[in-house]
Amino acid sequence: MPKFVETEHLFLDLPAFTEVLGKWLATKTAWRPNVVNFTRNLVDDMRPRPITRDLDWGVTIPLDGWSNQPLKKFYVWFDAVIGYFSASVEWARRTGDPDAWRAWWNDPDAEHVYFMGKDNITFHAQIWPALLLGHNGQGDHGGEAGPYGQLDLPTEIASSEFLTMSGSKFSTSRGTVIYLHDFLREYGPDSLRYFIAAAGPETQDVDFTWDEFVRRINFELANEWGNLVNRSISLAHKNNGAVPARRRPPPPTPSCWRCPRPRSARSAGTSRARGSGPASARPCASSRRPTGTCPTRSRGS
């Protein structure tokens, strides 16, 4: 039977970063909406978060009065995000250039992009930036930078939505899983790349089913895209003997510009309803056509 016991934990004072995190988040106008909206809700209700757990495994807390307690460990996601930086420092030390990490962490022009599922947004868009701001002495209460200097904050946090399988969460223990080596052996990498690119959970949760996978590969990749590529290459080979080299088309010359013919209100309205757009209905700035002749092709060319 579980029982309640009194225990002591360390907390990260997230409310001390409410203002600075809010201002920083407001600059991320190009982030995916799901990341911005989720993080904004967190910032609007910042609360202290415990960063220790009562466990017999994990990273020991390196503080007096805590390091000698065998059942006190850091919360894994507090320690894990720090690993982005600590691994860089360790890598630099092993290469024989202990300051090599600074090119990535002290250079304002360096870009830091983090990829994850949406359940990890809080650790990368709230906790990790707060830790970096705290080290930089940039919290709401000010301060001085720590021994590593000004560390770069995340440039981009790219978070997808959830990918489920036949209506259930992926779980190895429950057998709801597809092992990569089995998938590649049966279907190869191209089909997997296409399915993820075409139906990946970029903006909403996606449910993977084998029926949907087969439909997309057979009808979209093989039949539609494959047919298009096959026809294009066949025509290029037939008419040119090879795939033409890619080149940029020349810009249009003034002699190729033409004013639209005047139309009645009725025809203009009908054309607009069909999607020609307002630009086609605008009068020309000049009633004269430019001199010269547009390059044309004969019907047989």
Image (cartoon, rainbow, N blue to C red):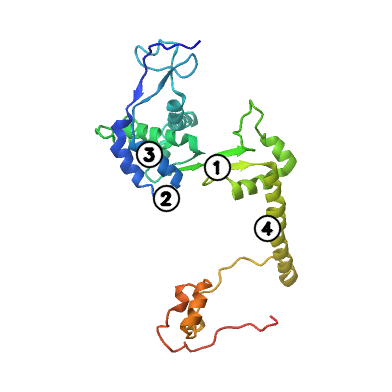
Check disc 3 and report its element: helix, strand or loop.
helix
Check disc 4 and report its element: helix, strand or loop.
helix
Please give the label number shown on residue 30: 2
Please give the label number shown on residue 225: 4
Q: Whole-Å distance between the Cαs marked 4 and 2?
A: 31 Å
Whichever of callouts 4 and 3 sits on the residue coming sooner in the sequence is 3
Q: Nearer the viewer, mark 4 or mark 3?
A: 3
Choose top left, top right, bottom left or bottom right for residue 13: top left
Where is residue 199 drawn, in percent x and y? 60, 48
Whichever of callouts 1 and 3 sits on the residue coming sooner in the sequence is 3
Q: Is residue 136 in sight in this rendering?
A: no
Q: Mark 4 is on which residue type?
A: Trp
Q: Nearer the viewer, mark 1 or mark 2?
A: 1
According to the image, label 3 marks what residue? 41
Please give the label number shown on residue 59: none
Q: Residue drawn 66% across and 84% down?
A: 298
According to the image, label 1 marks what residue? 205
Check disc 1 and report its element: helix, strand or loop.
loop
Q: Nearer the viewer, mark 3 or mark 2?
A: 3
Q: Whole-Å distance between the Cαs marked 1 and 3?
A: 20 Å
Choose top left, top right, bottom left or bottom right for residue 112: top left
Where is residue 201 drawn, in percent x and y? 56, 44
Q: Is residue 129 left or right of residue 195?
A: left
Where is residue 122 drawn, in percent x and y? 43, 34
Choose top left, top right, bottom left or bottom right for residue 38: top left
Q: Residues within 10 Å of mark 4 (few under 14, many from 20)?
A: few
